[in-house]
Image (spheres, coloured by chain):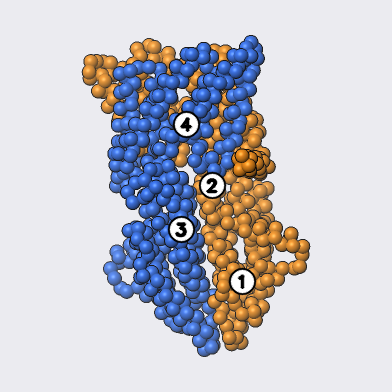
Chain colours: A blue, B orange
Amino acid sequence: PGKFKNNVVEFTNKVKELGKDDPRKIIHSIKFGLTLSLVSLLHYFKPRDSSIWAVLTVVVVFEFSVGATLGKGLNRIMATFLAGALGVGAHHLATLVGGKGQLILLQLFVFLLAAASSFSRFLPGIKARYDYGVLTFILTFSLVSVSGFRADEMLELAHHRLLAIIIGSLSCVIISIFVFPVWAGQELHKLIALNIEKLADFLQGFGGEYFGNEEEGENDDLVSRANKSLLYKSVLNSKTTEESLANFARWEPPHGRFKFRHPWKQYLKIGTLTRQCAYEIEALSSCINSEIQAPLEFKKMIKDACIGMSMESSKVLQELSSSMKTMTHPADAVVEHMTNSKTASDNLKTVMKRASMLEIKTNILEMIPAATVASLLVEILARIEKIAGS
Amino acid sequence: PGKFKNNVVEFTNKVKELGKDDPRKIIHSIKFGLTLSLVSLLHYFKPRDSSIWAVLTVVVVFEFSVGATLGKGLNRIMATFLAGALGVGAHHLATLVGGKGQLILLQLFVFLLAAASSFSRFLPGIKARYDYGVLTFILTFSLVSVSGFRADEMLELAHHRLLAIIIGSLSCVIISIFVFPVWAGQELHKLIALNIEKLADFLQGFGGEYFGNEEEGENDDLVSRANKSLLYKSVLNSKTTEESLANFARWEPPHGRFKFRHPWKQYLKIGTLTRQCAYEIEALSSCINSEIQAPLEFKKMIKDACIGMSMESSKVLQELSSSMKTMTHPADAVVEHMTNSKTASDNLKTVMKRASMLEIKTNILEMIPAATVASLLVEILARIEKIAGS
């Protein structure tokens, strides 16, 4: 029993953490509960066989972001309509043949359409946007075509069911748009800006960490800064999240500062560039903890240039991130810091040439990656800058 | 019309490509079509309201891999059972209260359970394994508790529906296990081994590419090799795939060479290490196309050592990958190549020391990353070797 109690306490803590982390998740749960009990109330007052389809629709369609909900709802409505029409047609055709042929023909239709639709789900383009629609399509088609009702009954049934599904989807969409909406587009925007900022944080801390030259501050401060500079790791694996957000965003109506036909694909491009940056940073960060370290003498020589470079490129990234957040064009500050970081990288080259002149006994194995990566960073930054963005 | 025709041709080509790429996808579609028409045949002979639930179950539960199908099927059965029982209980309780209280109490139940379940879907542990179960749970509970049937009717209904869902799930599971099964575990195994091999391919090609010393072969051969060495890029983003495969694999019964309680988590660990390797390789590969190149003189000096290193570490990876494929313990060859690559890296260090002695006018900015990364690679390899692995 003690173990059980522990488990319960642990679970409660996890839930609390999750709630604190993102209160919108709690709000989402409440929204969902409300929608569901609203729609089921409808069922209570007008108990009809088809109104359970409204309940079913709410459970399946309601998603965290507006885009996802809208996408699923539209998919469901369109697919039900299309499959219903096709199903009635197939049924009619089969009745014309009659007898044993009817059964065989219907089974053949179901088999063919099911196989074709399930194959189409492997096509990336369809998978991304219409996966749920295809699923509903197969479901409705097989239900309608095998139902064995007479044609007029079937039309009425189809009519009711479509209505139920529209009611279910509409309630979901309305609640998700008007009650504390979570816009996938906005999420994507924030995520990309945040990712750029995370890289900036790392670069800001990097100089001090690598050259072991933290100003003696409070310990807490140091630890929190070290944690902050490790945040970039999440950027490495953000591809899937970005892509699904961009997919959802394309379903969303214009909202806030995002106009119609907002260039969501641009975000994916910036996201990819940011991730390439993050790969370089990952390599850079492994230099900090590497066993092989450069001789102090050499480190001292290049210290200023390197710190300058990483600081300045960090500032470029910060400026880019904040100009994304405010949705303004990158300020002149970006250009300034770019120039500064290029100067710093030129400085570094000079210093290194001098170093090899001075014939230091050197095992430079470890220092130069820093420089390389930083200069690569500058290259990538230049590419980011090119992208007009929002 | 010309444009439409083009689109059709393009689409057909895409489909053909997809089929050639992985014929199992076509087989899957046929399996799905068969299962669905089988189950709907059942409905045709025993038309009952509940048997549409069998059809519905097939559409929703049938997935590409055995693990995913089994997981969804079990989730669906368990959740339906649990929610059905709870729903009948809640309904009974509400009837005891009676009058207006009944409605309010039922709505309250639906609201609370819906909110709680939808919140639980945010917990990563539940999301990964029981997401579908939670969804079915909410659905069934709200359908049952609001249905407004009498208790004895409801029990019969619940009984029929559960039976239908079990029949649906079972047909899916049986077909997916016994007709050309696709095991998620095996897929994971192959994926991890393949990813290691991709890194090996890159390293094998790297030496020649960086030092511009391809043996003059046929052009086709060169191109195909260059493409081959770019395959590693897919490793960078394989995390999501690996995790979902591992999740599915945990549902699967023992099969082939995979025994009960196969250590699927090990695969994720190896996968993560492989990916870290791939990040380093990404940095390495950017050196090939970088604008800044080392002076030829210097390149020549370190050429042999570097090629040696990348070749030997490539061989280590190849050995590891093939020993994974055959599920044997890594052969002595691995140890041998490890030693060789370490020797090569020591050689490189000596060469570099000598280089700085010789006072070459050097802008080594570009060469040394190669060395660093290669030595990092050796470190990571050492870690991989430690993992016992299947």
Residue at position x 34%, y 44% in the image: A182
Q: Is residue A41 left or right of residue B231?
A: left
Residue A389 - label: none
Q: Is residue B158 left or right of residue A148?
A: left
Q: Chain of mark 3?
A: A
Q: Share a chain, discs 1 and 3?
A: no
**Mark whose residue sits in front, 4 or 2:** 4
**Residue matched to label 3:** A270
**Mark whose residue sits in front, 3 or 4:** 4
**Residue matched to label 4:** A78
**Residue matched to label 1:** B345
Of mark 3 and mark 4, the one earlier in the sequence is 4
**Residue matched to label 2:** B242
Residue B302 position within the rendered picture, expressed as x and y whole percent measured from the top left:
64, 76
How packed is label 2: few (under 14 Cα within 10 Å), some, or many (20 or more)? many
Provide the secondary structure element on which disc 2 rests: helix
Q: Chain of mark 4?
A: A
| Marks 3/2: CA–CA distance | 25 Å
Question: Farthest residue in the bottom direction?
Answer: A358
- Indicate the quadrant where residue A221 lies: bottom left
Q: Chain of mark 2?
A: B
Disc 2 marks a residue whose amino acid type is Glu
